[in-house]
Image (spheres, grey):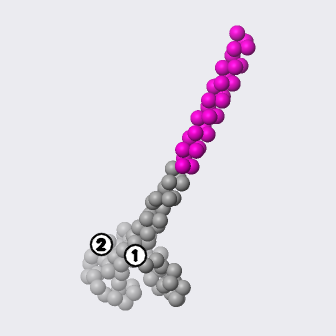
Amino acid sequence: MKNGRPATEKLKHFLSMLNDRLKKSRTTLKLIFYGFSVHELQLELMKEKGHMNNLLMLMIFGDIAGLPLFPSYFSLRILPYIVPLLDTWKRNLFREKDITDILSTDF
């Protein structure tokens, strides 16, 4: 009986190690297939989201950049939700761009 217990414990340990390795390999395969299929699309969508966000901020708070496009009443109502994003938007809007920035974008 004593000889049977360590063998079953070793078998359980082996099966748990095998299960862990299968989970890790499954996760690795998921990441590989994600990289092959969806990663570039997600990057493009994130860029597009950023461009749309910049356009919306310019329409709403264009007076900061010198373009009064939207009545200030509506801007003030939206202001509490936009305050955390305002500094980043201004930095992106007024960032100096050169020829390498234009050439690095995909067409």
Residue at (50, 84) in percent of width and height:
103
Q: Earlier in the sequence, mark 1 or mark 2?
A: 1
Q: Which residues are magenta?
A: 1-29
Residue closest to the far top: 1
Front-most of residues 75 and 52: 52
Q: Which residue is mark 1?
A: 51
Quarter location, residue 60: bottom left
Kind of residue sitting beneath label 1 = His
Q: Report x, y in % for residue 8.
A: 66, 20
From this view, report whether residue 9 is shown above or below residue 28: above
Q: To which quarter of the image does residue 53 belong?
A: bottom left
Q: Which residue does the image show at 36% across and 74% down from the upper left?
A: 52
Q: Which mark is residue 77?
A: 2
Q: Residue at x 58, y 39 (%)?
A: 22
Along the line of sight, the residue nearer the viewer: 2 or 73: 2
What secondary structure do most residues of the magenta stretch adopt?
A: helix
